[in-house]
Image (cartoon, rainbow, N blue to C red):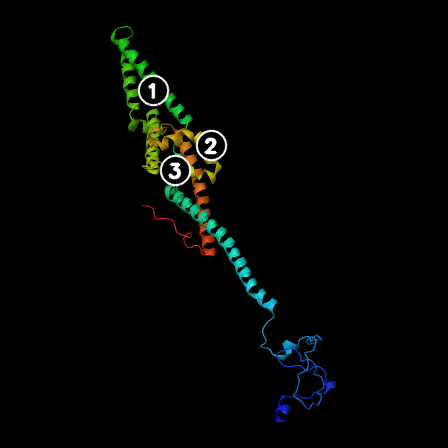
């Protein structure tokens, strides 16, 4: 009897409805137990489907309940995809950045080399190459006319004197011619000539021109050095289109062969050389501005390898 009491199912009120257990689906409604005298027979399992759990029952019942199968499968699959997308985005950002940094570094190195090779254009002395004291053609023509007049006067006086020696003219005429010849010769002496006139002689004009031209050639040789200045400055043609003019081609060839100063034999050659140096000076200022602008951009982007000062000139 005691065994029957232990195995008997607990009685449940049929009006109670489905019983919700924490952590699992609702239990089916048990049938009403009938008193039996013999051994207890368990009722057959119910074939009716169990009632579906109420919406949100699992979430309300236990916050530590396991996540659904579909959600658990989606979580590990979505995480690698997001990481992969982030990695690709970082690679796409880093690749252009590295190539851009390499291009900027190459450009800065080229500009730095140009600044180092062409820095001698800053030593340009305009007055030495411009030769502002150069005697003009009018002064030269005036001095030549005065020289011709002096030579003619001296020759005429000498003819009169020689004619008197041969007896062709009277002796007093020959003496007068001799005196005039000596005075004209003394007027050709620079110290005596400066007493009565301040105009330079033809010889003075020629010597002054040669002196200025010699000084200009020496200064051009100082600027050119052993490497050839304007030949190296031709690399700045992208910053000043005037450096590509064909009238400078002969100067560039001579500078490349390191024989330019000795071929500056006329003032026109020196003036052309001066014009090229003035254009190169403009280009140098633009190269310098571009170099410092590239340095500023490199510093703003944190490219320490690109942002470097110009190398000291040896």
Q: How far across and how far down the image is residue 110, in percent?
A: 41, 44
Mark 2 and mark 3 lie on one chain; the one further toward the N terminus is 3
Pick the front one: 142 or 165 = 142
Locate the C terminus and report the quarter of the image it occupies: top left
In this rendering, does residue 88 appear at all?
yes
Locate the N terminus and report the quarter of the image it occupies: bottom right
Q: Which label belongs to residue 150? A: 1
Q: How far apart are labels 1 and 3 at the CA level?
A: 51 Å
* Residue pictured at 64% horizontal, 91% vertical: 5
Pick the front one: 61 or 288 = 61
Mark 2 and mark 1 lie on one chain; the one further toward the N terminus is 1
Outermost residue on the right side: it is: 15
Q: How far across and how far down the image is residue 142, in percent?
A: 40, 24
Outermost residue on the front side: it is: 38
Q: How far across and how far down the image is residue 265, in percent?
A: 36, 27
Task: Please rate how many residues cluster around mark 2, counting C-alpha atoms within 10 Å: few if below 14, some from 14 to 19, many from 20.
Answer: few
Mark 1 and mark 2 in contact (Cβ < 8 Å)? no
Residue 279 occupies which quadrant of the picture? Answer: top left
Q: Which label belongs to residue 245? A: 2
Instruction: Give the structural element (helix, strand or loop) at label 2.
Output: loop
Q: Which residue is mark 3?
A: 232
Label 2 vs label 1, nearer the camera = 2
**24 lies above or below 245:** below
Pick the front one: 33 or 273 = 33
**222 lies above or below 167:** below
* Residue pictured at 50% horizontal, 54% vertical: 91
Mark 1 and mark 3 lie on one chain; the one further toward the N terminus is 1
Instruction: Give the structural element (helix, strand or loop) at label 1.
Output: helix
């Amino acid at each position: 009897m005691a065994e029957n009491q232990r195995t008997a199912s607990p009685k449940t009120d049929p009006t109670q409805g489905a019983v919700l257990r924490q952590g699992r689906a609702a239990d089916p409604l048990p049938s009403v137990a009938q008193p039996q005298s013999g051994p207890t027979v368990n009722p057959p399992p119910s074939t009716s489907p169990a009632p579906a759990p109420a919406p949100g029952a699992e979430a309300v019942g236990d916050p530590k309940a396991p996540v659904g199968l579909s959600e658990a499968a989606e979580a590990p699959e979505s995480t690698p995809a997001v990481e992969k997308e982030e990695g690709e985005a970082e690679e796409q950002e880093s690749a252009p950045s590295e190539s851009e940094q390499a291009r900027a570094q190459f450009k800065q190195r080229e500009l730095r080399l140009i600044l180092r090779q062409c820095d001698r254009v800053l030593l340009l002395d305009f007055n030495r190459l411009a030769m502002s004291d150069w005697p003009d053609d009018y002064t030269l023509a005036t001095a030549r006319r005065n020289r011709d007049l002096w030579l003619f006067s001296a020759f005429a006086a000498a003819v009169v004197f020689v004619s008197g020696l041969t007896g062709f003219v009277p002796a007093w005429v020959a003496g007068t011619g001799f005196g005039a010849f000596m005075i004209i010769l003394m007027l050709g002496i620079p110290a005596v000539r400066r007493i009565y006139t301040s105009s330079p002689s033809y010889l003075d004009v020629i010597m002054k021109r040669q002196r200025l031209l010699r000084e200009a050639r020496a200064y051009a040789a100082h600027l050119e050095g052993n490497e050839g200045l304007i030949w190296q400055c031709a690399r700045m043609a992208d910053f000043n289109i005037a450096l590509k003019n064909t009238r400078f081609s002969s100067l560039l060839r001579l500078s490349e062969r390191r024989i330019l100063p000795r071929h500056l034999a006329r003032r026109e050659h020196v003036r052309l050389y001066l014009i090229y140096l003035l254009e190169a000076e403009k280009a140098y200022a633009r190269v310098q501005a571009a170099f410092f602008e590239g340095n500023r951009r490199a510093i703003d982007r944190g490219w320490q390898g690109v942002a470097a000062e110009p190398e000291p000139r040896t």
